[in-house]
Structure formats: structure tokens, C-alpha cells
Image: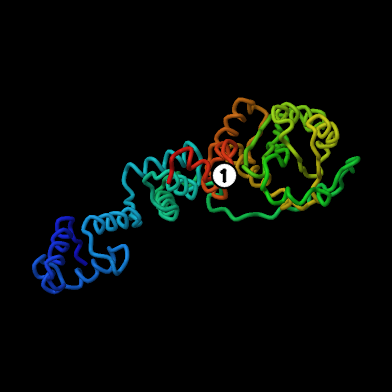
Amino acid sequence: MSQLTESQRYEISSYLQKGKSKDEIASLVGVHRSTIYRELRRNKFKPSDRYDAEYAQYRYELRKEQRPVKRRFTVFIRERARERLVNDHWSPEQISGWSKLFRQPMVSHERLYQWIWEDKRKGGDLYLYLRRRGRKNRKRGNKNKTRIPIANRKDISERPAIVGKKKRWGDLEIDTVIGKNRKGLILTINERKTGFVWIHKLPNKEAKYVAAATEKLLMPFKGKIHTITSDNGTEFADHQYIAQTLGIDFYFATPYHSWERGANENLNGLIRQYLPKWETMEHVTQSYLEDIARKLNQRPRKRLGYMTPEQAMKFKDLEHMKKAFNIR
């Protein structure tokens, strides 16, 4: 298909005003007759309108802007993707989605995966920065089935239905993650709507330490938090102290129903990217944990439209963020 130039459009307009036929115009302009017919059909505001060369050029340029552009995997794009993957630990989908949101050149996430696996076949190590590295999920056994009952626990069945909708800020999930050989322990908290996370090191699993760390992390948000949901670990035995101190309701999930705290399970998986199960956590510093939390809070999330949790904390929704960053 021939692409008309701006000057050719003005020629067409002039010939039409002189009463020339479409076939004559095609011969005079030097294009196929179908090009003239297509131009007159596509680049008018209404079919009955007079052909306007200036408006026709505008319609052409507008379509050209909206046309999807096939991105070449240039050295520049490759290095940008490598930096996001290796330094920021973003997934290929996050790299591609965030770049699209902020109108930065990037190839699709499928192409990024092809690049990573091609690198692996050549002996490269890019695949090591993927969360799963191609591993299959392994079901957990129900270990330590006998649990000490937690006094005055409020079951998740009593939790308000709005919490499950993830429509309001301030509904949290909480858990602990332990290192290899039970050496080293950390507390993880996530906000359900935005995915914002807090991480804190614990000296041991006693409930009083968990309660104190929770109070320290969340006290700046008192008055904005509504609920916290945990599993049935005895480290949350001081739940009433946490609830009273923060002015919230504390709920416990059904035993062995990890999907009831799916966001927190996912968070712990993300943290394992930095603190693998085969490593102890006894020498991990709080400063390093805060660095992990910062990276996770600055990592784009697909369910947030590729906003980061940090951005989602500042803006009501994706449209408000786009307006603030002048993204169309």
C-alpha cells in the first residue's frame, strides 16, 4: 500500500476542487486508484464532508502514533532489562509492563524469557535471577500438626467481607519466616490492597518479641489500620496486645488454609529470592532487611497496573498516578 505524503494530500484536495475524477487524480498524483479511494474513505471526519488535506494529514499522523511498534531488542534495551532483572530483581512481566506504562522502549515479556533461556543455554546466569528458575512447585506436608491453642482467637470467618475485596487500605497480613536449621527469624507484614511490605528481624519466636516488633513497625500508621490476619503460630499469642495497642481487630486463618493469606504467602516467596531456604538468617542485619523491603516496595505489580506498592500508597488509583506523572 502506497503511503501518501502531505504534499500529495494537498494535490488531491486541489484536483477535487477542480472537479477531477478519482481515476484522473490517481494518474496525476502518481499512485494507484485504490490509494485515492482509500484516502477519501479513511481520512474524512464524515463521509459527506469535503476532503480537507490538513485534516486528512492529522488523521494519518494520529493513526501512526497509535500503531503498535515492533521493538527491536537493541543493546540499549537489553542492558536496561539486565539492570532491572539483576539489580532490582524484577520479573520479565514487570519489566515489560512498567516500561509500557511509562512509555519506555522495551520488548515483550515473552521475548525477555526467550533471551534469558537462550543465555542459559550458552552458559549464562540470567535465569538465576528469576524467582522460580523453572522449578516446579512442591506441596507442603502438614508438619507439626499438634498446635497449642491460642487463647481468645478471632476466626477469619468473623472478619468483615470488605477485607477480602482489597478495596480499602489498612487490612494487613502477618507471618514469620525462619532460616536454615532454625537459625535466624524475621517478621513479615503486607498490606492487602497495595502490597506494601514491612520486614523486621526477631531474636526468637517468642510472642512478646513478635508483638513488640509489630508495634514498632505499625505504630506510625495507627488510626489507618483496620485488621491484621495471621496463621495459628504460637508466636502470635499476644494478638490481644497488638490489637489493643494499634486499635485494630486481629484474626486467625483456618489451620492449613494458606490460601486465606495468599498475599503474605506470595510475599514470603519474594523474600526467599533474597534469603533462600538453604541459608541461615542469623547474620542478616535489619538494614539489609529494610533494603529488601525497599526493593519490593519499588517493584511494579501487575495487579496494580504496574504501579509499585510505594506509588500505590501515594495515589488513590492508577488514573490518579498517570495524571500526576502526566502519562496519557
Q: Position of residue 123 (x, y in %)?
A: 41, 47
Indicate the quadrant containing the N terminus: top left, top right, bottom left or bottom right.
bottom left
Question: Is 93 left, or right, of 177 in this rendering?
Answer: left
Q: Pinpoint residue 223: horizontal percent, then vertical percent.
A: 74, 32
Residue type, mark 1 in image: Asp
What residue sits 60% from the left and 37% below the top? 313
Q: Please rate how many residues cluster around mark 1, counting C-alpha atoms within 10 Å: few if below 14, some from 14 to 19, many from 20.
A: some
Residue 239 located left or right of residue 79: right
- Name the residue rendered at 14%, 67% in the picture: 31
From the viewer's side, name the closer residue of 88 and 154.
Answer: 154
Q: Is residue 183 left or right of residue 43?
A: right
- Residue 136: x, y in percent? 59, 55
Q: What residue is pinned by disc 1? A: 317
Which residue occupies the foreground of this view, 88 or 214?
214
Residue located 88% across and 41% down the image: 150
Tell me how the rendering is colored: rainbow
Q: In the rendered image, which quarter is residue 8 located in?
A: bottom left
Q: What x and y, as percent, mark residue 52?
A: 23, 60
Q: Nearer the viewer, residue 135 or 5?
A: 5
Mark 1, secondary structure of its residue: loop
Q: Is 245 drawn above or below residue 299 in the view shown?
A: above
Query: Total of numbered circles in the picture?
Result: 1
Left or right: 55 in relation to 209 = left
